[in-house]
Amino acid sequence: MMSRDAAKIVMELVTRNAAEQDAVLTKIQSLCTEDEFNEYRLMIGRSMGAMLFEIINPIIAKYPDLKPSELS
């Protein structure tokens, strides 16, 4: 069982992490070939998908009020 306070802290972490991963894609795009960039984008997409399905969705299911505005 997860506490709301702990869930909120974890949700803040994964929200920041997702934003950082997205920002990295913007930062590296000019450093890569199109194929390399697409590979990084797929890797980061998998990471963000795992966070969504394994962390964010279970927390939102238990505490809907913690849903980040970015997911609205």
Image (spheres, rainbow, N blue to C red):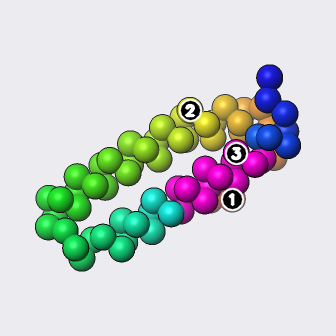
What amino acid type is highlighted by mark number 3?
Answer: Val
Q: Earlier in the sequence, mark 1 or mark 3?
A: 3
Q: Earlier in the sequence, mark 1 or mark 2?
A: 2
Task: Quote the CA–CA distance across marks 2 and 3.
Answer: 12 Å
* SS at mark 3 in the image: helix
* Camera-nearest residue between 64 and 48: 48
Task: Quote the CA–CA distance across marks 1 and 3.
Answer: 15 Å
**Looking at the picture, how far across and down is residue 8, in whole percent?**
78, 47
Disc 2 vs disc 3: which is toward the camera? 3
Q: Which residues are magenta?
A: 8-19
**Looking at the picture, how far across and down is residue 37, in whole percent?**
23, 61
What amino acid type is highlighted by mark number 2?
Answer: Glu
Find out whether the residues at labels 1 and 3 contact each other: C-beta distance under 8 Å: no
What amino acid type is highlighted by mark number 1?
Answer: Ser
Q: How many marks?
A: 3
Q: Which residue is mark 1?
A: 69
Q: Which residue is mark 2?
A: 54
Which residue is pictured at 22% across the width and 73% down the height?
31
* Camera-nearest residue between 4 and 69: 4
* SS at mark 2 in the image: helix
Q: Earlier in the sequence, mark 2 or mark 3?
A: 3
Answer with left or right where residue 7 lies relative to residue 39: right
Q: Is residue 72 visible?
A: no
**Looking at the picture, how far across and down is residue 29, in whole percent?**
27, 71
Task: Classify 21 as above or below 42.
Answer: below
Check the picture and name the quadrant holding the C terminus. bottom right
Task: Classify 39 as above or below 20.
Answer: above
Q: Which residue is mark 3?
A: 10
- Is 63 in the magenta? no
Magenta region, main secondary structure: helix
Find out whether the residues at labels 1 and 2 contact each other: C-beta distance under 8 Å: no
